[in-house]
Image: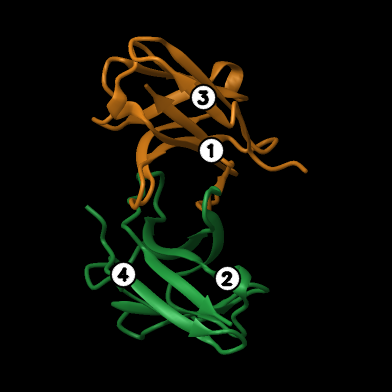
Amino acid sequence: DAKTTQPTSMDCAEGRAANLPCNHSTISGNEYVYWYRQIHSQGPQYIIHGLKNNETNEMASLIITEDRKSSTLILPHATLRDTAVYYCIVVFSGGYQKVTFGTGTKLQVIP
Amino acid sequence: DTGVSQDPRHKITKRGQNVTFRCDPISEHNRLYWYRQTLGQGPEFLTYFQNEAQLEKSRLLSDRFSAERPKGSFSTLEIQRTEQGDSAMYLCASSPQGHYEQYFGPGTRLTVT
């Protein structure tokens, strides 16, 4: 079973920041938070990951709460091309462990 | 482009036929994964290779499914005696040693009629 909970869908106005929440209240100390997105009919695309510190790359920012029980993916200036399903997953860092994708959040960017 | 490639992109087959899909991971990625995805669902894990060793298989991978990764490079996923319930997108991903982010291919969409 998925270890994360995400809203089923969200809308965001083009040009505004998209804030996608994820709950992972049972995360353990050696599990990372990873985000992927899947644009219609394509394979998922890795976005960003983090352990406990906030992270930023060219695609997005990841804010993890101090207790690590939830996180938010931020797309600072959403474009129509950001319309996709966004998956938040937890990944064990101590060696391979299969990952479980839930159903994700369908983000619709509106012109 | 040196991303993950999958072949074919689309496959239509009749029930009962065998099909084989190929995945070419990113060069020097030692980890390779197969997933299955049906409409409206996230990818479901099928199996995982580290180099040529198949280290984990999902219970979803029935005895009609087999995967190989000879020489630790490309991988094949074969489905024997296909059933309509096998219709799905089959995704392959790879990741490098010491990293856990997975890079996905475009998928092979299988339709069983």
Reading the image, the residue beneath label 4 is: A8
Residue A56 in percent (x, y) is at 60, 78
Colour in which the image shows chain B: orange
Q: Chain of mark 2?
A: A
Asked if residue A37 lies left or right of residue A14, the reply is left
Question: SS at mark 3?
Answer: strand
The chain containing the residue under callout 1 comes to B
Q: Which chain is green?
A: A
Is B24 placed above or below B20 here? Answer: below
State whether residue A19 appears in this view: no
User: Percent x, y for residue A61?
Assistant: 55, 79
Do marks 3 and 4 share a chain? no
Chain designation of label 3: B
| Depicted A19 relative to depicted B101: above or below | below
Give the total of numbered labels.
4
- Asked whether the residues under marks 2 and 1 belong to the same chain, the reply is no
Amino acid at dot 3: Lys
Q: Position of residue A38 (x, y in %)?
A: 50, 57
Which residue matches tag 1? Answer: B107
Where's the C terminus of chain A, which quadrant? bottom right
Q: Which of the two residues, B19 or B48, is positioned nearer the viewer here?
A: B19
Provide the residue designation for mark 2: A82
Q: Secondary structure at mark 1?
A: loop
- Disc 4 residue type (three-letter): Thr
